[in-house]
Amino acid sequence: MEDAKKDWADQIKEIGGLVAVIVGVVAISGIAAGALIVNNDTAIALAGSTIAVIGSIVGAYFGVKIGTDQTRNAVEAQREEAAKAQVYAAHASEKDADVVVQRAAQAVQALRRPPS
């Protein structure tokens, strides 16, 4: 049930973000078209500015979207690995428990060390 709510919320965010991008592009295009009709001397400068703004808006939207998707995938992979580790730990024998705990601590410390 909670996953369905998250999926629904994610879909709303994606649709809302896309609608915002489309509205922004249409508004800027409308302003540019109006300016071109009023004064043809500024057409080149205005067209270049409009293209730059539209490119920035679209690039920012897709940059954030890709970053969010990658973060979601990384968190999901981490959850899967944590679940696997819990299953492995649950099936370890009592005599090996101390060794397993020590190796787990060593693995965590190795991850915290900065790369050389």
Image: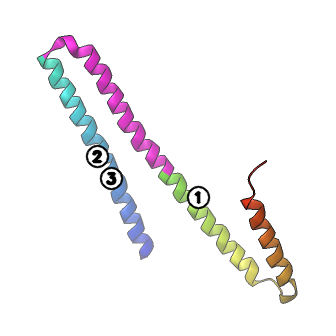
Residue at disc 3, secondary structure = helix
The x, y position of residue 52, in whole percent, is 35, 27
Q: Does the magenta stretch include residue 57?
A: yes
In this rendering, would 44 be left or right of 81? left
> What scheme was used to colour the molecule?
rainbow
In the image, which is nearer the foreground, mark 3 or mark 2? 2
Q: In this view, does 32 lie above or below 93?
A: above
Q: Quadrant of the N terminus?
A: bottom left
Name the residue tied to disc 3.
Answer: 15
As drawn, the label of residue 20 is 2
* Mark 3: amino acid: Ile
* Mark 2: amino acid: Ala
Residue furthest left as drawn = 38
Q: Is residue 64 above or below residue 2?
A: above
Dots 1 and 2: beta carbons under 8 Å?
A: no
Disc 1 from disc 2: Cα separation: 27 Å
* Mark 1: amino acid: Ala
Name the residue tied to disc 1.
Answer: 74
Magenta range = 39-67
- The residue shown at (28%, 46%) is 20
Residue at disc 1, secondary structure = helix
The x, y position of residue 108, in whole percent, is 74, 66
As drawn, the label of residue 108 is none
